[in-house]
Amino acid sequence: MTNDKTWLQRWDERYSAAEYAFGEEPNVFLREQLSLIQPSKILFAAEGEGRNAIFAAKSGWDVSAFDISIQGKHKADTLAARHGVSIDYRIGELPELNYLAGEFDAIALIYAHFPAHIKSAYHQLLSTYLKPGGLLILEAFAKNHLEYVLQNEKIGGPRDLASLFSADELLTDFAGYDILQLTEQEVELSEGLYHNGKGWVIRFVGRKLLY
């Protein structure tokens, strides 16, 4: 568990504004990846205001999502209603949300920067919810992103190395996957109020092995 009220307050405060913090459009990489897959059952981790989950629901997916912020859920519910879709959105710490082993055909982590001290444990727990043969899709800020955010705070992202990602960490956290993509690159983000400008991201797509 995070055991950090400051962390929760930060996200509740950010999501309480009228405008969507990261916009209402889906992440570009997620949209590209979902276009390659037959819609089935997907879980969105740390989903915030719901932009990616609602896009998936509109595309025919059976969507579940979670976050710690009730304000994020309120915004996601509003966005879902506007688009005429529904998602199963749960609030709380991941270990307490009662997801089942092998429940999902895909799991998406789009800028799901959990606190550093629980990051790996959450990744490994999420992996148990993915059925064998299922896909994990991740985009997040990599270690080199620290240089970018120090130059341009509008790009957003964590300011501590421990909360940023490396390829070695992902390979350890998601052992037992066929790696379809694992790359780092500079990207130009334009996502709402808090992801604007050049940043350094890591992208991971893995298929959970059948054994």
Image (tube, grey):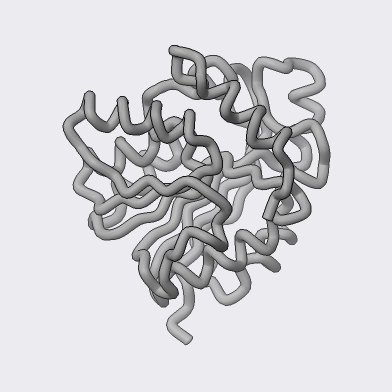
User: Is 155 positioned to the left or the right of 12 in the image?
Assistant: right
In this view of the protein, which residue sits in the foreground, 120 or 165? 120
Q: Residue 14: x, y in percent?
A: 58, 22
- Which residue lies at the image location 47% right of the left edge and 72% below the top edge? 208
Q: Residue 123: percent from the left, percent from the top?
A: 61, 61
**146 w.r.t. 98: above or below:** above
What residue sits 67% from the left and 63% below the top?
Answer: 121
Question: Is 142 drawn above or below residue 135 in the view shown?
Answer: above
- Quadrant housing residue 12: top right
Quadrant where the N terminus sits is: bottom right
Q: Residue 116 at what x, y percent from top left?
A: 76, 49
- Residue toward you, 154 or 121: 121
Residue 172 appears at what percent x and percent y? Answer: 70, 68
Is 188 placed left or right of 90 in the picture? right
Dividing the picture into quadrants, the one containing residue 76 is top left
Q: Position of 163 compared to 62: left or right? A: right
